[in-house]
Image: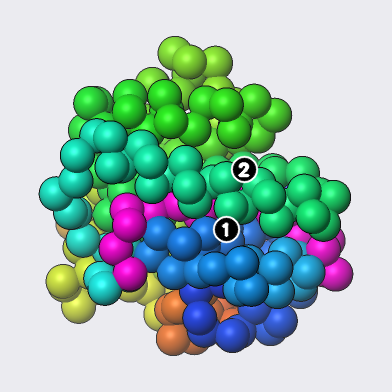
Amino acid sequence: MRIDLNCDVGEGLNNEHLLMPYISSCNIACGGHFGNKNTIDETIELAIQNNVLIGAHPSFPDTENFGRKLINISDAAFKESIQNQLNLFMNRLSFFNVKLHHIKPHGALYNAIALDENLAILFIDTIKRYAIDAYLYVPYSSVIERVAKENNIKIKYEAFADRNYNDDLSLVSRAYENALILDKEKVFQHVHRIIKEGKVKTISGKEVKIKADTFCVHGDTKNAIEIVEYVSKKLKNQKIIVG
């Protein structure tokens, strides 16, 4: 059995060279919350060296809050920003002669389009031409999943290896202490339950149905390297290959 393990990278942590050997796809910041031509190029090169599939990680244009706050922005400004981010990213991929594997929105944008139909429709309308041969990473049972399917965009279901869930499958807010799962064995158990049972244990103790083709460990989680190495090796021991 195979499963994809992904990381958000190119976000200024300079830990990509330590993460890449243990993951199979990556989401590279492309200028919304972080990133520029140089950081994108450096991260693409590392991904190529490690045979890691490459995705774009667009965000609300908000470097001040690292793209993790919902901001007030007009539809036109939103569309222009996402297009500028993806145009830059596609230009750099073209320079290295590699293809875009997927698009994964970042932070507050990811959470917003999971619930907000108008923003989900606007986002899909904006990325449609970039996603002709690429996947969109989406949360299971979300608004963006449905809108993507309606527009014939290929999807991969994503779950978060290092984040706790509420009963409605939303992520526990980072404002709370229990938002993150930092214990590497607990991360593995969390991931393994989703793979084997198709369920996630929420913070209330309920087991809720979920689907996942890919699991994310945030590159800026303080022990991200330890987590991806441990989870990758433990999955392999269970005859589940990351790749």
**Tag 1: amino acid:** Asn
Nearer to us in this view, 144 or 98 = 98
- Residue behind mark 2: 102
> Looking at the image, which residue is at 41% across and 24% down?
125
Q: Which of the two residues, 75 or 165, is positioned nearer the viewer here?
A: 75
Name the foreground residue: 233 vs 67: 67
Cα distance in 3D space between marks 2 and 1: 8 Å
Where residue 160 appears, as percent x and y from the top left, is 44, 57
Q: Could you say whether the residue bearing mark 2 is in a helix, strand or loop?
A: strand
Q: Secondary structure at mark 1?
A: strand
What segment carries the magenta color?
48-63
Residue 235's x, y, as percent? 68, 63
Residue under circle 1?
Answer: 27
Q: Residue at x 25, y 71 (%)?
A: 65
Please provide percent x and percent y for residue 152. 54, 16
Mark 2–mark 1 CB contact (< 8 Å): yes
Q: Is residue 194 visible?
A: no
Q: Is residue 31 magenta?
A: no
Vertical placement of 82 versus 22: above or below?
A: above
Q: Nearer the viewer, residue 230 or 61?
A: 61
